[in-house]
Image: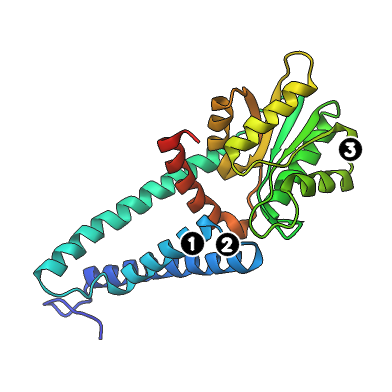
Amino acid sequence: MTPVDAAGGSDPVGGGARAAGLLWIVVGAVLILDAVIVLFTISLNSGVVATFVLGALYLSYGLYRDRTRGRARNLLSRWLKVLVPTVSVLLLLLFVCLAVFGRTDTVSHREDAVVVLGAGLKGEEVTPSLRSRLDAAVGYSVANPDAVVAVSGGQGPGETIPEGLAMERYLVAHGVPEDRILREDRSTSTHENFVLTKGLLDAHFDADYTTAFITNDYHVFRAGNIAENAGIDSTHAHADTPWIEIPVAYVREALAITKFVLTGR
């Protein structure tokens, strides 16, 4: 039955509370669904786990936010009604900033080399995020046919070959000459991507050289800072993030940025 006030009209406060609760339930369900889809179609990673947990928290909050009883629980409820929306708004602002920054390319297409960062395989098949990066690299290679293309990625859990090898195969199959490709296939993190690839580029070029890197939009900000820490002054070009991976990718990146702030890697 619809709550009514003393005058017999509908209660706007109660209606607003129910609408807010429904919003949290929907957001939570969407995050859980996305995490499950990515888990079964791509792979299990920290972003999948974090997105599932975040979705479960939102779902629980939406279901139980107005069902607490007792003084202590009411106090907890009041705190949660401030904390959950505040943290969520801050996360959303972070995601928007990462997307805007990441989609603002700085490449001149006159660089001597372009570094393509790995993004996981399913067996030996490139994942949608990695395919997007490689397609961007093919486009860059067409615009700058003199550039060396360095692919970087080692072999992780659930991968039957190193990412670097799969990336090289993909680029060759899409028209990039094999003799223009440098392959780094031992790295296990973005930091190692840049450190190990820099070693290959230093050995390849006799003099100073300029570089660009390609990664998905959500990853550009952190990758650029890690490249700088590794001694690489690089421009960047973004690859679109497949829509089904957006929630998981951005939640995972929030965790990775926290780690970067704490460790520098």
Residue 105, position in %: x, y?
A: 64, 32
Q: Are marks 3 and 1 in contact (CB under 8 Å)?
A: no
Q: Nearer the viewer, residue 161 or 81?
A: 161
Residue type pointed to by label 1: Val
Q: Position of residue 240 (x, y in %)?
A: 65, 47
Residue type indicated by callout 2: Leu
Cβ–Cβ under 8 Å for marks 3 and 2: no
Q: Which label was assigned to residue 49?
A: 1
What SS does tag 3 mark? Answer: helix
Between discs 3 and 2, the one toward the N terminus: 2
For disc 1, the neighbor class at 10 Å (few under 14, some 14 to 19, many from 20) is some
Secondary-structure class at tag 2: loop
Tag 2 residue: 44
Residue drawn at x 71%, y 34% is: 115
Q: Which residue is mark 3?
A: 178
Marks 1 and 2 sit apart, C-alpha to C-alpha, by 8 Å
Disc 1 secondary structure class: helix
- Residue at 79% across / 46% down in the picture? 165
Image quadrant of residue 104? top right
Q: In the figure, 180 relative to 21: above or below?
A: above
Q: CA distance from mark 3 to mark 1?
A: 38 Å
With 94 as the anchor, is 158 left or right in this view?
right
- In front of the other: 22 or 196: 196
Q: Image check: 78 left or right of 225?
A: left
Confirm or deny contact between disc 1 and disc 2 (CB under 8 A): yes
- Vertical placement of 136 versus 81: above or below? above
Whole-percent x, y for residue 79 in the image: 20, 58
